Image (cartoon, helix red, strand yellow):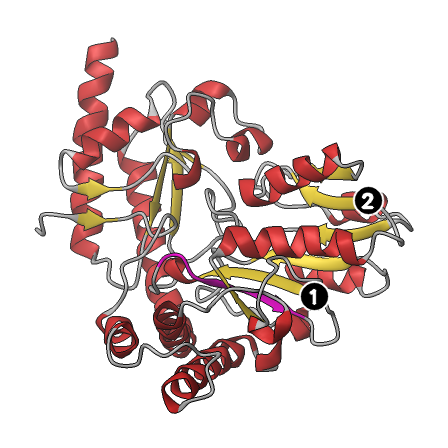
Amino acid sequence: MDNNIYMDCAATTPISDEVLQSMLPYLKEEYGNPSSIYDLGVDSAAALQRARQQIADVLACDPASIFFTSGGTESDNWAIIGTTELRKEQGRHIITTKLEHHAILHTCEYLEKKGYEVTYLDVDELGMVKMEHLIKALRPDTILVSIMSANNEIGTLEPIQQIGRILRGHSAFFHTDAVQAFGQIPIQPIELGIDLLSASSHKFHGPKGCGFLYMRKDLLLPSFLHGGKQESGRRAGTENVASIVGMGTAAEIAGKELVKNAQYKQKLRDYMIHRLETEIPYVHLNGSRYRRLPGNVNISIPGLDGETLVLMLDSEGICCSSGSACTSGQTEPSHVLRSIGLDDEVARGALRFTLSKNTKKSEVDYTVNKLKEIVQQLRKMHN
């Protein structure tokens, strides 16, 4: 058994050898500024366009709709705040859900202080948005609906296609945080009626500190960062060429392997869930059993503390989490688990395992066996 078993791919993923090799020239020989007009700069600009095309190919969209950012958080902020600036004359109402990532929730809270009204939709016990709640919440002054494609903690897939159909008859923009979904499941914004889509490179085996925002081609959000004329004058700052090249390579690989990898991870996910539910008493599966990300396993073990379990598994060489990496260390139970109706005792006992294409069945078996031992040990201590 390897010394380190990594099962926290929702937090971040290791870059692949192919991604690293594609980046190396732009960290050394090909160091030109892509805004320069001499050959060294022109070569870097061409590399950016290749990466833009690689991402666009996965989304089946025009590469001119892809704008590079520092990651999912910036992309989410730009989508939401940019929409309010662009459409301030049309209305001041936003709709989102109670289980969004904090990059969405905290941005909405910021806008509430600026006089915007935000409706936070409830979800059901599986983490699904109910269409009747969305329809009821829509108003003539609603300018934006922001609903994630897949939840980062419990892995539930939201009904994005249905949401897109509903919003085709409304003037509100439709934004989706696809940070967990891009490269994991098929998602084509034009077909689905998505106007704005956020993604982050390090969630699909690309480098950290790099992401993109898809904007529908005829939608021109104002600049979020002000300065130079980079990114067609929409996002100032010299582009991180090496990371963007790596992100493009990672996107191309993810797109080509999407179906194969999804089938593999889904089979391994279901095997792991089955073992956990049948071999550890009182295990509770969080989120939808079937409408969930291929590699997501989120369970609760009532009466035990998730962070304690994470640390004990770490001592056995297993990396997992008790929730979002962005909120680890908090004493309060996850807002996502509360939003699906779990009481604090069940929510505090949450563990999230997120598998990758590199996860082996033997690693799943080792992890389940070690977790069984730890749970038995802790329950004996508590009795």
Q: Closer to the N terminus: mark 1 or mark 2?
A: 2
Picture mark count:
2
Report helix, strand or loop for mark 2: strand
In the image, taking residue 281 as reference, residue 371 lies left or right, namely left
Which amino acid, mark 1?
Asp
What mark, if any, has residue 93 been given in the picture? 2
> Which of 116 and 325 lies nearest the eye of the viewer?
116
Q: Position of residue 228 (x, y in %)?
A: 57, 68
Picture quadrant where residue 115 is located: top right
Can the viewer see residue 78? yes
Q: Which residues are magenta?
A: 208-215
Picture quadrant where residue 307 is located: top left
Tag 1 residue: 195
Can the viewer see residue 146? no
Q: Residues within 10 Å of mark 2 (few under 14, many from 20)?
A: many
Q: Relative to residue 343, is residue 15 depicted above or below?
A: below
Q: Position of residue 352 (x, y in %)?
A: 36, 40
